Amino acid sequence: MTKNILKTTLLALGAGSMLVGCDLEQPEAPCFVQDATNWYVKYDVVDEPKRADGTTCTARVTAERLGVYKFVDPDNRDEPLITIRPAGLAGLGARDSGAPQRQTATGKLSAEPDAEEFCSGTEFSVATADAAFVPAVPDDPETPDDDESAPAIPATVVTYEFSNVRVYSAPSAPGTQLTGELKYTRDGCTSTYVMRAIWPASPCIMNSTDAATNCGAGSGLNPDFAAECLQINNCGATPDMNAAGYNGCCIPTKAIPSFNASEE
């Protein structure tokens, strides 16, 4: 009975809307971001690592997991925020005596997608970790069967500066791909990159002919995405998956948005 009353009411409302005219503007869909810690990003180098004096150095970043989240103040919905936390900083958190929040970059996110279905992230804070020195651990002579020694870990300072972030937020792939620029500095060695990021971070097997284990249908990704397997250890796979041969993680094949040809 209740369903019938509701249905009748909705029909009446719909008819009333048509009577007042068809020029009513529909509100734009808001920017959508997949809130998760299991994004995976590939960094395409733009400027090779260098120090401030122009000399070359070796510190660089290739690919990693990201945590990406959108926040909206209920009293100010037109000014959402977006945060990005790289695994490279989260992994140093235990050695950083500063506030955990500084390992996360926070920026402003546009409220609605632009004409190309992108939502822009701007004015990001600098994300950083100042990891302390960890002394070497000697082996315990009382347990000769187990080597419990560990080498010293040097202190390190790492910063991520994100800019021109763009989240693809079309209805066909709402908030599941993003791009942007990164300035990465480790102990005074700086390099810059363009990002290709995708959600979720799906493990894969290099050179597999099975779509489900090589970024295709059944892998957990949108089957319309153009993605490929990047070989890297411990790409979010469980120990069982690593034992089964999962040795990489799926990344976008093309510049964002990365879709198969039939979907472009």
Image (tube, grey):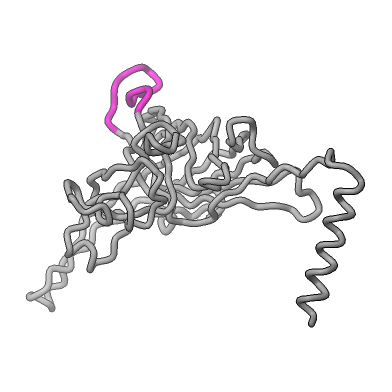
Q: Is residue 8 visible?
A: yes
For image coordinates 49% across by 33% down, the residue present is 180
Q: Nearer the viewer, residue 115 or 236?
A: 115
Q: Nearer the viewer, residue 83 or 153?
A: 83
Give coordinates of residue 112: x percent, y percent.
Answer: 68, 40
Q: Quadrant of residue 219?
A: bottom left
Q: Nearer the viewer, residue 114 or 92?
A: 114
Is 83 situated left or right of 143 in this image? right
Is 246 situated left or right of 264 in this image? left
Q: Is residue 74 above or below residue 20?
A: below
The extreme left residue here reads: 145
Count of numbered circles on the image: 0
Give coordinates of residue 164: x percent, y percent.
Answer: 55, 30
Give coordinates of residue 253: x percent, y percent.
Answer: 34, 36
Range drawn in magenta: 45-58
Q: Is residue 121 visible?
A: no
Q: Say if the magenta span includes residue 75.
A: no
Q: Quadrant of residue 24?
A: top right
Give coordinates of residue 63: x percent, y percent.
Answer: 34, 42
Is 211 situated left or right of 106 in this image? left
